[in-house]
Amino acid sequence: MKTAMTIVMMLALTAGFGCLSPRGGGMSQDEGFKIAVPTLTTEVKQGELQTVTVSLHRGESFKRDVTLEVKPSKGISVDPDHVLVKAGDKPDVQLRISAAKDAALGEYRVYVKGTPGTGEPTSTEFNVKVVAP
C-alpha cells in the first residue's frame, strides 16, 4: 500500500511541475539549467494548431544565453524551430505545433535541445498526438 501511494505521489508531482531535462550548463545546480516540457501528451487536431510552453529552469548563478533547437518527428510542424533565450529574458517560450489536414493520426515526438553560450547542452522530448477533427 505504501509503495502504491509513493508512486501516485511521484506521478502527481511530475504532472504538476512538468518533465525536466537533465541539467545542462555548469556542474553545480546553481550554475546549470534544465528544460521543462509538457508531461501530458499534447493533442492536435488534423489541420489545426496548438500552443505549448517550454521553459528554462535556471540555477541561481546561471546567467548565460541558451539556444533552444526544436525538432519534431516527420508529420507535424513546430514554429519556431530555433529560439535564443537571453540571460535576462523570461524563461518561457511558446511553441506552435500544427498538423496538416491530411496528417496521419497517431503519436509523434518533439525533441528540444538547449545549448548555452558556454557549458554543456541538455535535451528532452515530449509527445504530440494527432487526432481527427
Image (cartoon, helix red, strand yellow):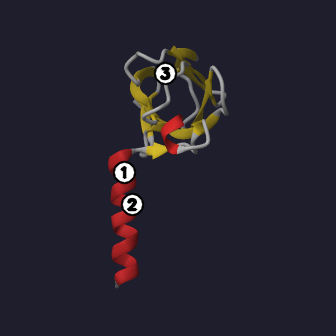
- In the image, which is nearer the foreground, mark 2 or mark 3? 2
| Left-right relation of 24 to 129 | right
**What's under tag 2, amino acid-wise?**
Leu
Q: Residue at x 63, y 20 (%)?
A: 117
- In the image, which is nearer the foreground, mark 1 or mark 3? 1
Disc 1, SS:
helix
**What's under tag 3, amino acid-wise?**
Ser
**What's under tag 1, amino acid-wise?**
Ala
Displayed quadrant of residue 125? top right
The disc, 1 or 3, on the residue closer to the chain's N-terminal end is 1
Disc 2 marks which residue?
11
96 over 34 or under it: above or below: above
> Which quadrant, please, contains the C terminus?
top left
Q: Residues within 10 Å of mark 2 (few under 14, many from 20)?
A: few
Dot 2 and dot 1 residues touching (CB under 8 Å): yes
Work out whether residue 37 or residue 32 is closer to the camera in this orientation and state it.
32
Q: Residue at x 39, y 60 (%)?
A: 11
Disc 1 marks which residue?
15
The label number, if any, that marks residue 36 in the structure image: none
The disc, 2 or 3, on the residue closer to the chain's N-terminal end is 2
Q: Residue at x 61, y 24 (%)?
A: 116
Disc 3 marks which residue?
98
91 over 31 or under it: above or below: above
Picture mark count? 3
* Real-space CA distance between mark 2 and mark 3, rounded to the nearest whole angstrom: 28 Å
